[in-house]
Image: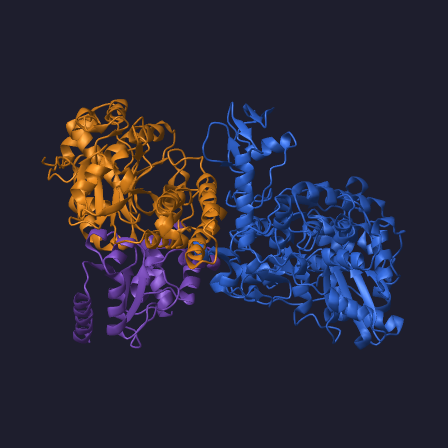
Chain colours: A purple, B orange, C blue
Amino acid sequence: MTAVKQLVKGLAEQHGRNEESLLPILQGIVSQEQHISEDAMVEVARELNISAAQVYGTATFYSFLHTKPLGKFVIRVCKTITCMMHGKNQIIKELETVLKINLGETTHDGKFTLLETNCLGQCHKGPAMLINDKPYTQLTPEKVREIIMMYRHEEVRAN
Amino acid sequence: MKKKHLQRLDLIFKNEHDTEAILEKTFKRSNDDVINDLISSGLKGRGGAGFPTGLKWKLASEEETEVKYVICNADEGEPGTFKDREILSSVPHKVLAGMAVCARIIGAKKGFIYLRGEYLFLKPQLLEAIDKFHSLLDEMKVDFRVEIFLGSGAYICGEESALFESMEGKRGEPRNKPPFPTAQGYKDKPTVINNVETLAHTYSIFKYGPEKFRDLGIQDSRGSKVFSVSGDTPVPGIYELEFGMSLQKFVDDFADGDAKAVQVGGASGFCVPRKRFDKTVIGYQGKLRGTSLPTGGSMMIFNSSRSMYNVLHNYLDFFVEESCGQCTPCRVGTQQLLLGVEAVKKGEQPSSYLDKLMDLAEAMRITAKCGLGQSVANSFSSIVENFKEEMIY
Amino acid sequence: MAEKINLKIDNIAVNIDEGSTILEAAQKINIRIPTLCYHEDLCVAGNCRVCMVEQVGSDRLIPSCAMPVSEGMEIMTNSLKVRSARKQVVELLVSEHRAECTRCYKNGKCELQDLSSEYIVGENGYIDLIPLKGYSIDNFSPSIIKDDSKCIRCQRCVRTCNELQNIGALSVAYKGEHMKISSFYEKPMYEVVCTNCGQCINRCPTGALTEKTYFDEVWSALNSEKKHVVVQTAPAVRIALGEALGMPVGEIVTGKLVAALRRLGFNSVLDTDFTADLTIIEEGNELLQRLKKVLVDGDTSVKLPLTTSCSPGWVKFIEHAFPEYLENVSTAKSPQQMFGALAKTFYAKKIGVEPENMVSISVMPCTAKKYEADRPEMRSSGYKDVDYVLTTRELALMIKQAGIDFSSLPDDEYDSIMGESSGAAVIFGATGGVMEAALRTAYEVVTGREVPFKNLNITAVRGMEDVKEATIKIENVLPEWSFLEGAELKTCVAHGLSNAKKVMEAVRDGKAEYHFIEIMACPGGCLGGGGQPIPTSLAIRKQRSKAIYEEDSLKPIRKSHENPEVIHIYEEFLKEPLGEKSHELLHTHYTKRNRY
């Protein structure tokens, strides 16, 4: 059994094989693989006995369920008005410089993906961003550099 | 003369732990009594739409169905709103207590907290609170369980029927109404769906009685409200204030002295220009002088350095992306509004094109399927009307 | 009995059952409210917002298709507010639609075009969104073309594919400005579980979903002096073609159809009905043989129930959805493909034409037939057995192009050899027809007597019920069929693939014991096929069905095995049912395909 098959099967057993489990299963895949591959969607369709097109239709509806590969750390910078007023664009620029990628891209080593997102609910502490699940607020270019350094170091240590 | 400050309240965030007493107290009373308390308290939904909470519970309780659900709507996605996050992280037990009382009244055994994906980091502490809560229920022999259902980044899922669809594994597309959730909600079963703050307020109402809540606020807008204050303010943050305040007072207390507009109610709310601050009251529609504006609590302040074109552009960008896309006025209308203001700004369309866009916004308001598409007109019309020059030059 | 509700629409009082919608109430008093996403075969979506009406006293408009009536309601369908909102909605739809109407296959048959002409969507419309979207057209399928630039997101196709047909090839994907109708992973329709049934085409209000057309190729063939062009016409074409040419629904136009084909220049005008009769002989014998092997020989390798194989949408469906049941599908080819194989062999020889100089055309009520003709197995003659498949709609267009006044054409008759047919073949076009035809023959083969139904009409398998069952007791059989004495032949008929799925699931779960199952992919059978005139509705399908059974009752020969040309072809060419020649030309095999 392929790894993705195993993963989906495990998630289906954990959450149950009904349509209400679709989102939790897709979220489970994303938390493991950062994105939902074509193969994974076929497996989900098989496990839940629904059409693959339905899985695709649901997955593409939600902006946190990516169907294209993403980096290990997904950075989502809030682009809503108050974060924008407080310097979101400088934050993006800084991230682009530090990571040497453009918005929407993934670093060559597959570690970081840089995205924008809608309101993170941190408007009083903007600019804000999420790295995977973790929120970072009141960002400044210096702070952003430190955060990215920290993730890089942790990566090195983990290896 | 010294300025009189708005009265800050400390009801919702008050550190008190009386879940057991509240459940005991309410469970002893008849359902009708409890519902009547809620109705007489005047509590209305704090998500923004303002449906009377007591009536919602009553309607669901009258449905003769075995399976029913209570859902706490924690899909707080409205730009400029962050109060539910704070409530869930500091007083989750109040929300859970409200859910338990509701479950008891309508006859539900299962509840869900639909937590937006952006708040995933809250999940561990919320699970802890739920565990504690479940132990208490077990001790009290109450058959009710709450689960967290996680969203995945879709603003529209804050719309109640879209939220049900999402929980059912589908795209978060709002349903036709009727039927309403109290008759056919999650899995087509009678469902009470309340905003986080609404549920937390029920805790206070059950604890202190409806009168205390009713004494706060004005006419059709009773009680306190948690406001999320952001933008050009020296004191951004979360504030519990009495309903019915004038916007002028709010600006006096919170803005930086140079406020030119306040966006009340987020991207789907209204933009109030300086000249109308003193004629605007924060509260649900009622018999008030001036304009009364309902809100989920988002208050974004813009000072005179801000371009209202940029503000509107940002909102429209948001709607173009977050529309579910199923109904024509919202899917196409949002794109046309965005492209339209861009075209006017660039001089590709005459300024009179703004009138056509105003008509479009009005058409969206009366034809769109759900609150999202209907309320795009709120910010669009109020910004274009009041800051027309900024849209053109 | 349902409670009655009183309301007023445009100041006219209406009294209607509780639970009805405003749209239905308006229809009752002949007030037309325009609709787009609404289709009576499908569940209510309420998403196009064209059918908005005003409720007196209410600020916002309400969707008449989705809103139930309530007592005392006062509805305005034509107020200024309604007209202006409706016009804006149409303008918005036009702005996201590639409005190249003069170059569109659906020109003149497009519901959005009708609405925009009614509301005079003029120069001062909204910004054209099409240049911003980068659409591409999916025309890889031999049956279906999907052009997203003409899509108005009404989701009729999605509801058709998922509810009516339960195929799941189409879904709505993405949200907001990117929302679109998509297959799995946006693959071409050719690569996904699409059965090519074309029901989505029948319900698409615009030109976003159309059949791939082949009339240009057919015109070329007709104008080539070297080519001998043979045409066959399916049973359901003759009762529907008139609709596309301005005649009433349910008109039988067989004679005019033949006359028109001659006028168009087809060299041989023949009938798929002939091979429908042949299918009955082959498939009926296959059924009896399978019964014998199972009941007498105890051969477990032979599978029952036997299912029909004439509907190519059904065949592709089972290949995807129930591949473990492929051995249950009759190996008999569909009448179209039997015809194709015989045209370039038996018939070509008969008329002295080299098969390479023959062009074999079929006119079908079906889009899946285009795919079927393209299957690699369908080259038994050594050539492509059927070169081009036209839908009923395409033929209607060719007749118009040729300037033929169809309704005034005198009746004409099919050419002989492969032009004769029985009433049993005609009813292939309706759900239950193949079953009835098969029973008329099989019963008689086994017992030597006609089926014990008045006028040979086996009404239990007729009609538009989702799934029909009939059990026939077989008694006093001929000696060679003694093993069937007293047997009860259990049959089942399903139309529409969601019903097919139900039946197959019941079979799989051991909840149904059938010997023979007829399945047609399309609602109502071929008469409701994906290549038939648009619009479609239950009422239209019932009218067409009525015409089919009328045509059957008027036929001098009602049983396939009595068709003299069929008898003749066995004597002269095929020798015996399921014989060597039959296996070579008239039978096929199936392919397991991806479930998802």
Please provide percent x and percent y for residue B65.
38, 32
Please provide percent x and percent y for residue B39.
27, 26
Residue that appears at 81% across and 51% down: C559
Q: Nearer the viewer, residue C376 or C367?
A: C367
Position above or below: B183 against C368: above
Residue that appears at 30% across and 67% down: A114
The answer to which image quadrant residue B137 occupies is top left
The answer to which image quadrant residue B362 occupies is top left
Is residue B296 in sight in this rendering?
A: no
* Count of number-bearing discs: 0
Q: Is residue C108 left or right of residue C596?
A: right
Q: Is residue C132 left or right of residue B101?
A: right
Is residue A114 in sight in this rendering?
A: yes
Q: Is residue C481 left or right of residue A112?
A: right
Position above or below: C471 against C72: below
Q: Nearer the viewer, residue A40 or C86?
A: C86
Position above or below: B199 against B339: above
The quarter of the rendered structure image containing the N terminus of chain C is top right
Please provide percent x and percent y for residue C496.
61, 50
Please provide percent x and percent y for residue C255.
86, 52
Q: Nearer the viewer, residue B369 or C487?
A: B369
Residue that appears at 66% across and 63% down: C212
Position above or below: C288 against C499: below
Q: Is residue B148 left or right of residue C272?
A: left
